[in-house]
Structures are given as structure tokens and as C-alpha cells.
Amino acid sequence: MMNETDYNNMTGGATLKPFYQAYRLVAVILPPLEMAILVFGLGSNIINIIVFLKTGVKDNVTTLLLSLSVSDATYLILMTPALSTIMIYYLAPDWDWPFDRHFTSNLFYWPAIAVYNFSSFISLFLGLVRCACVAMPLHFKSVFTKSRTGKIVIALFFASVALHLPVLTIFKIVRIYEPFTNSTLLFLGVRNHLSTVVKINDYLNRNSIPWISFIVMIACAAVLSFKLFQSSRLRSSHRNTAKQGSDATSHRGKEDEGKMSEKDIRVVQSVLLVCTIFILSQLVFVITATERLINPEFDQGGRLQNLFLIATA
């Protein structure tokens, strides 16, 4: 485990005991907690996949929810080696590593980020599809068929890979000699264009696209919430209507135009939940990514490194 001298060297030589003690506490508690969350998330997504496959993928929403579960499960699988390495490092600091301890973390980091962003694209598309189908059902219900949705999901996957292709190729596997153990270890080296690629990735994948997705998802959540409120009010008004005859029939006919069925309401509620989770999970990310872009000191190795570590913990 990192000692106080190592920590002070990492932070530029300043002895910061309060933050170091907090760092040690988080370093011991966080990895097992994250592993428990990872196992729970992986199990939940596997259950979701089984349920979707057994009940049948019948429409665009179930197609997207199944794709989202598969993507999330893949992300968690890619993060497992890195998190396992961190747990071993902090809980068994004297472990004899057969490779550089950063090898698994760096090797699977960018593939995991690419899959994570693929999940974000699916969530965004899910919000857009349901928002369009609820706001203008006659125009869009026949547009987003199951087969078209599946093709778009595949296109989103390749788009995510293409957007992250530069950072997916910045590492190269090399062998280094370790004199203390008299052995050769696998090590991930970086290519010369690392700084340029990371800067482009920061502008595109960590700022521009996330902010656009964040704003669009807020708009979708607002529209879905309004439609749920409107449908609830119309259903309540329909139940309380005591009129009879042609006036009542005409009144109900106008209400039915904006009223959703119980099934539609449940679907909208599930999509709204996905939108809300997306917004809350992305909020801290987009703020810290923007601050990191504006202020270079807000990063590892910068003057505001401590604040950066807390914000991204």
C-alpha cells in the first residue's frame, strides 16, 4: 500500500496528513465495496437478460433494454480484472506480481470506457424513441420497429468503437526487466502521440458528446414527465365526469386522444427511470470533465489533484 512518503511525492512533496488519512481509509474500504456493487450489478444484468429472452423481445423498448443490459454486463466484466488488481494491491501489498500491477487496469480501461459510452448511447436513443412515440405516436410508432432498432443499436456500437479508436490504440505490450526479482514482467507502454490523442478524446468523448447527450436526455425526461402528468390528469378527469349523453361522449373522445393505456404508462415510467439514472450518473462526470478541460491543474499531477481525486472517487 502507498505510504505517506510515496503519497507526498505524488502530490508534489507537500505533507497533507488529513487528506492522506482519508485517502488510506477510502483505499481500504472502497475496493471491497466496489467489488460488491460490481457483483450485484453483474448479477442483476444477467437476470434482466434472461428475463428479456424468456419473455421475448417484442418491440423497440425491450430491444433497447436488452441491449442496455448486455452492454452494462460487458462493462462490468471488463472492469473486473482492474478492480481485482486494485483489491489485491491494497489488501495484500506484498503480493508477488507476475506482471506490472497497472497492466490490467490500463489494458481494459479504454475498452471499458468505450462500452460504457455505448450504454450511454443506448440510454439516449431509448429516451429519444419513447419521447417521440409519446409526443407524436402517429408519426413515429411505425418508424422505430424492432428490426430497425436492432440495426441502430449495432450502428451505435460501431460508432462508439470508432470514436474511441485513437485511445484504444495508444498502448503497446512490452516486456521489462525487474532487477529486484530477476524476472521479466509484462508492461503496457504508451505511444508517442499519447498527449494529442488524450486531448482530442477529452474534447470529443468527455465534453462535447456527453454535454449534448445530457441536455437531450433532460429534454426527453421533461417531455415524458409532462405526458405522464397529462395522462394522469385526463384519466382522473374521466373518472370524475358525471355527465351523460352526447356532451359526455364528445368530452371523453377528446380525453382519449391524450390518454395512455396502463401498458404505455408502465413503459414510459421505466424509460423515465432510465433517463433519470442517466442524468444523475452523468451530472458529476460532465461537470468534472468540463472543469478538467478548462483548468489543467484540476487533474492528476496538477495543483488541484486532491480535489480531482475526491471528485472522481
Image: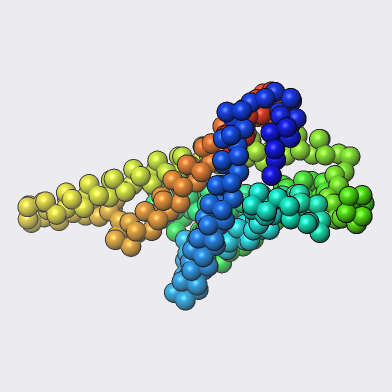
Q: Nearer the viewer, residue 10 or 166?
A: 10
Q: Position of residue 8 (x, y in %)?
A: 71, 29
Q: Nearer the viewer, residue 219 or 85?
A: 85
In the displayed structure, does residue 145 sit left or right of residue 204? Answer: left
Q: Residue at x 16, y 53 (%)?
A: 238
Q: Nearer the viewer, residue 26 or 136?
A: 26
In the displayed structure, does residue 244 sit left or right of residue 163? Answer: left
Q: Position of residue 292 (x, y in %)?
A: 65, 29
Q: Residue at x 53, y 57 (%)?
A: 36
Residue 267 image-quadrant placement: bottom left
- In the rendered view, tell whether residue 164 sits above or below residue 12: below
- In the rendered view, tell whether residue 79 sits above or below residue 15: below
Observer able to see residue 262:
yes
Q: Residue at x 45, y 39 (%)?
A: 219
- In the rendered view, tell whether residue 234 sits above or below residue 2: below
Query: Looking at the rendering, in which quadrant would you find the N terminus?
Result: top right
Q: Position of residue 189 (x, y in %)?
A: 86, 47
- In the rendered view, tell whether residue 125 sits above or below residue 289: below
In the displayed structure, does residue 170 sit left or right of residue 160? Answer: right
Observer able to see residue 286:
no
Number of numbered discs present?
A: 0
Q: Position of residue 300 (x, y in %)?
A: 70, 32
Residue 98 image-quadrant placement: bottom right
